[in-house]
Image: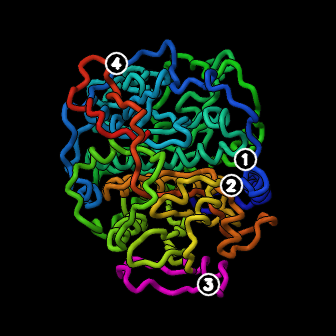
Amino acid sequence: MSDTLLAPADDALRVQRSALAAAYHERSKHRLERYANGPETLDWDAQPDPFRRYRGAPLQPLPLLAQDPATPWDALHRPGAVAAQPFSLASLGALFELSLALAAWKQAGPDRWSVRINPSSGNLHPTEGWLLCQGVPGLADGVHHYAPHEHALELRAALPASPAPTSPRVFVAQSSIAWREAWKYGERALRYCLLDAGHAAGALAYAAALQGWQLQPCPVAAADLAAWLGLDRDMDFPGGAECEEPELLFELRPPDTAAAPLPGDWLSQPLWQGQANRLDAHPMYRWPVIDQTLEATRPTAGAATAEAPLPQATTVPPQAAPEPAASLIRRRRSAQRFDAQARLDRTALWPLLQALLPGRLPFSALPEADHVHVLLFAHRVDGLAPGAYLLPRSEAGATLLRRQLPVSLDWAPVAEAPADLPLWRLAANPALAGTLRTLNCHQALGSDAILGLALLAEFQPLPTPWAYRERLMEAGLLGQALYLQAEAMSLAGTGIGCFFDDALHQLIGLTPTAAPQAALQSVYHFTIGRALTDSRIATTAPYAHLPAWPERLADTSRSPA
């Protein structure tokens, strides 16, 4: 979003709010000498309820797919390759089933838990999904909350009877419940909420592409989105029920169709119903800095004045992947352990990196999603020396990186890389395993991976206060692309939110960040390798608890959690 969204008179407030965001980021860093403020103990028997419900809101079950679309993975990346489906209960059910629904149930001994299609730090899932629609056959006009456990829509607000629009109007939205993450991670939790919002936006973009739709971001003021979703109705969050933060709004649009009016233009006189359940009746800690940062970074009224055009893909898929996209989407898991001996040929690395370039799915899900750049640690890549490499994702980003990183680095172009892949070698490091383990909070997921990645965000000065949210969401969007591209390569990925921020900066020579004006910040780490299966964990189908769940999806052969 452009800096011009705030009037000149608001400049001082904008600077103050941006400074609050930067101060939060500095405060929530993990450091080699100490971790960010978090709970000293966890009561796992009192973990917050993973499912938000609005009791009293009518429930509309969504149909489950009888058969997954056969669309191959690479077809999703070719504009026009997938025919647009009409908006219906079935097609919207497929959208949610392949984006925000349950993916499986896991069990180890007496413990049983669900995992979902969209990734989440700690499997805590702060992101809630919404549907706002008018004129869709089989669905009431109004505002619906998606209930993943039931794979159903809760009608939060019905619209009075009115003539049907010429064509359906369909929007999806996201909100976040920060307490789901803060319960476990303390002050750093807001970062994870924003990364997860990016994951979920990516998941929706891929699922929409499977229906032949585009996911058009709609910049909107937080206060407006809260009103449209009923999140500002305190009476609907009784007894200490955790509030939800409005995050993102998208229009679902078939290609080459005009934009529909925003929901505020037709969501008049809604009839609200339902009250939120309380997720944690006995919270042990409070983290007020999260609420302060959320307030500081909310998009203001000016955000509703700019709608970014839909970016178009500029390249064809880097390699043919005949496997159905839905299969990759369903089986995505965060690897818990990696085979420390696995290797990758460098020719297989190029498609992975090409999938991160702007102008491709899923990056149209956010406006201007080219402000986060990729620092690659090639660990066990045949034909590529172990060490650090850099992939700028824009020309402006490349200039910034050259200006901020030391000239003493190698800065050697990787001649073997494809012409459209601006990959630079920064430094060799034959002892990379120990470095990656240390940087990633001493986790073996760093040392045992084939690849490690750190995502560097253009950070200071932030053009708007809400750009802080956008940077982390963009990093989560990149994480979603990495997850699915790894699956397409028969590998697995793991997003890592626990890393030592400034230790990474110092390793590559970034300006020390004690003064919060550093131009780049590491906001997300990711590792890719060959996952090891834990045979102690049993896997069962996600919706076996619902009637008529297709037996074909009861396959338990894949079990990384």
Pick the front one: 250 or 519: 519
Q: Badge 2 is on which residue?
A: 465
- The disc, 2 or 1, on the residue closer to the chain's N-terminal end is 1
Quadrant holding the C terminus: top left
Q: Badge 4 is on which residue?
A: 545
Q: Nearer the viewer, mark 1 or mark 4?
A: 4
Does 11 sit left or right of 194 as displayed? right
Q: Residue at x 26, y 54 (%)?
A: 73
Answer whether residue 22 is visible to the viewer in this image.
yes
- The disc, 3 or 2, on the residue closer to the chain's N-terminal end is 3
Pick the front one: 176 or 258: 176
Pick the front one: 268 or 192: 192
Which numbered dot is residue 515? none
Colour theme: rainbow
On the image, the x and y values in percent for residue 80 come to 22, 57
Q: Secondary structure at mark 2?
A: loop
Q: Residue furthest top?
A: 56
Q: Badge 3 is on which residue?
A: 409
The amino acid sitting under disc 3 is Leu
Circle 2/circle 1 CB separation < 8 Å:
yes
On the image, the x and y values in percent for residue 386 come to 50, 75
Whether residue 426 appears in magenta in the rendering, the answer is yes
- The disc, 1 or 4, on the residue closer to the chain's N-terminal end is 1
Q: Nearer the viewer, mark 2 or mark 4?
A: 4
Q: Tag 1: Cα neighbours inside 10 Å, few (<14), some, or many (≥20)?
A: many
- The disc, 2 or 4, on the residue closer to the chain's N-terminal end is 2
The amino acid sitting under disc 4 is His
Q: Badge 1 is on which residue?
A: 296
Whether residue 47 appears in magenta in the rendering, the answer is no
Q: Tag 3: Cα neighbours inside 10 Å, few (<14), some, or many (≥20)?
A: some
Q: Nearer the viewer, mark 3 or mark 2?
A: 3
Q: Which residues are magenta?
A: 398-427
